[in-house]
Amino acid sequence: MIKIARRPVLLGAATVAFSALLTAMPASATTETSESSQGVHTDVSSPTKTFTTTGKDVPVGAWQDRGFHASKAYFTFDLRPYRGAVVGHAEAYATETAANDCAKPRATEMWVTDPATAPTWLRQPKERVKLPGPGAPAGCLSDRVEWDAAQAVSAALAAGAESVTFTLRMPDDRRFDPSYGRRVANRLQLHLDYNRPPSAPANLMVGHRPCGTDPVYTPDNPVQITGVVDDPDRSPVAAKVTIWPVDDPANRRELGPDSATTAPHHALFRLPADFVTDGRVYQWTMQGVDSVDSGLTGPASAPCSFIADRVAPSTGPVVTSTDYPNDGAPHGFVGVPGKFTIDAKGDQDVIGFATGNGYVPADRPGGVATVQYTPAEPFDAFRVWPVDRASNFGPGTHYGFSARSSKPGVRFDVVDVNAGEPVRLDFTPGAMPGVVEYVYNFGAAGDVVVPAGPDGAATVTVTPARPWASLTVSGRTREGWTSERWDGMVELGNGTPTVSSSTYPADRPGGGVGVPGDFTFTSTRPGVTGFVYTVDYGEAVPVLAQNGTATISLTPDKAGYHNIEVTSTNADGSASTPRRHVFIVNG
């Protein structure tokens, strides 16, 4: 709300009746402003001429100056910014600059005239209404002589006028008496105290769906409607709603006004549950209500219509696919898309389907839709739900099927590789046809694309910074299809020792209880000075190495499975990845 200091209107006795009328009118001002207008004047001595004053003041009434003169002054104000406004108060005031005879009382009148484009004494615009006034402090001259212009401005706005013209003149019985003549500054002021109605609501929605030319289907219970009401004065505003069934427009219900908030006001109404019936078409409009003057209501919005639909489809759709039939046998490949047909089987309530990839419309209510789906694993499922106009979901359909694995082959040898040394990775396409490139990510360093050869294979070299690193590999075809992903770890041998025994070979029966056997540890890791081993997860035992080799002797006391775990060590205390040797003692 804008507030501008305003002096009280000083009106004479002749204005009492009109002032009483103003008192009875509702005060609804939310904005105050002042306009000013420079005027033109006429002169009886030049009856066909319009005078545009370039000086600081204009004459009103009669005066003597090289002859006899009599004048009227005209001032026009643009009302277009105030269209639709309700005027609470309006004062027009002038500043007097001279009086021919201060002994004579102030007799200046102000009238509303027809539009004055180029007035002359002989072609004067018709004077329609005399304004109450003048009001001014006692004294010869005043810098603020006021007339009440509220009724005049209100009438002009009500008539749709784009402007209003005021004339300053003397009464008929004094217009040719020089003793009453005066001069005023050539800038008439018009002070307005007004309130404009709220604008037509916008952004109308039913639930979360915008209103349009067709009815909005909504599953909500209660139905929720919203809109945004603005006010050109930015004052607090409320909203009210009128709703009716389309087939019974006389059965109207009014809701609101709701609680006012500062514009723009986001209004929300929940409609009475007993008023809304499923399947029936309703229309509603919203209007803004000025909170300063509850009688000032803005224009109604365009009608918005809706249909409540709280019943979901009752049956799930039928899914078929020639690319991936659900016959128990694998088809296609993981990563290669196939077409799936969804059929609502004539259920007119169904207009589309929800899948794991989003929503797809049916070709008609109760009709079919064809979608593309890419299996992500060998045993996959395509899931779909029927959807009606109100976005209600019906029972889902689970269509399970099998796809051939498309995981690439990955080979590498890291038995004798240490951190900081290169590792060769070999990629082959596996069962995936048409692989032209691979996308791999080693050590989570980011995806790298490498082309495949004519046979679909590719070889890359990487250098691990640590004894282990993650590795993912996918093949990609010319069509952009991506295979099933190989996902694993590359764990470096890091000088992992080997273990050999002629009496107790790995993973085979040998020797016997009480039969001694030699075990030889060998490591190619540079700088190996010894080994640390454990038998059946027992106490760690160190042994010195010579040229990367050491031999120990063990005599088993029990038959069955046993194991030796060996780690090579360096003089700096570093150790290799352990090696486990499992052997079987004959019983």
Image: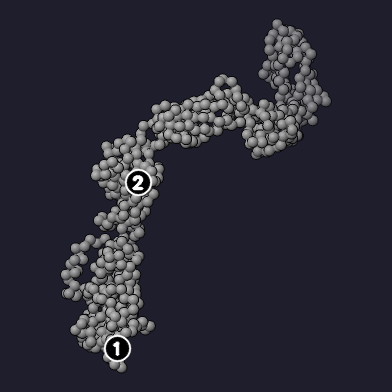
Question: Residue at left 35%, top 46%?
Answer: 304
Q: Return the x and y of residue 40 as percentages of the image width and height.
A: 33, 80
User: Is residue 25 placed above or below 559 in the rendered structure?
Assistant: below
- Residue 45 numbered mark, or none: 1
Measured from the top left, where is residue 28 in percent x and y? Answer: 26, 60
Which residue is the extreme one toward the right? 547
Q: Quadrant of the C terminus?
A: top right
Estimate the spatial distance between the alpha carbons at disc 1 and disc 2, rounded to whole Å. Answer: 65 Å
Residue 520 is drawn in which quadrant? Answer: top right
Secondary structure beneath label 2:
strand
Choose between 5 and 247: the one closer to the eye: 247
The label shown at residue 304 is 2
Residue 233 at x, y percent in the picture? 34, 60
Residue farthest to the bottom, as pictured: 66
Q: Quadrant of residue 186?
A: bottom left
- Residue type, label 1: Ser
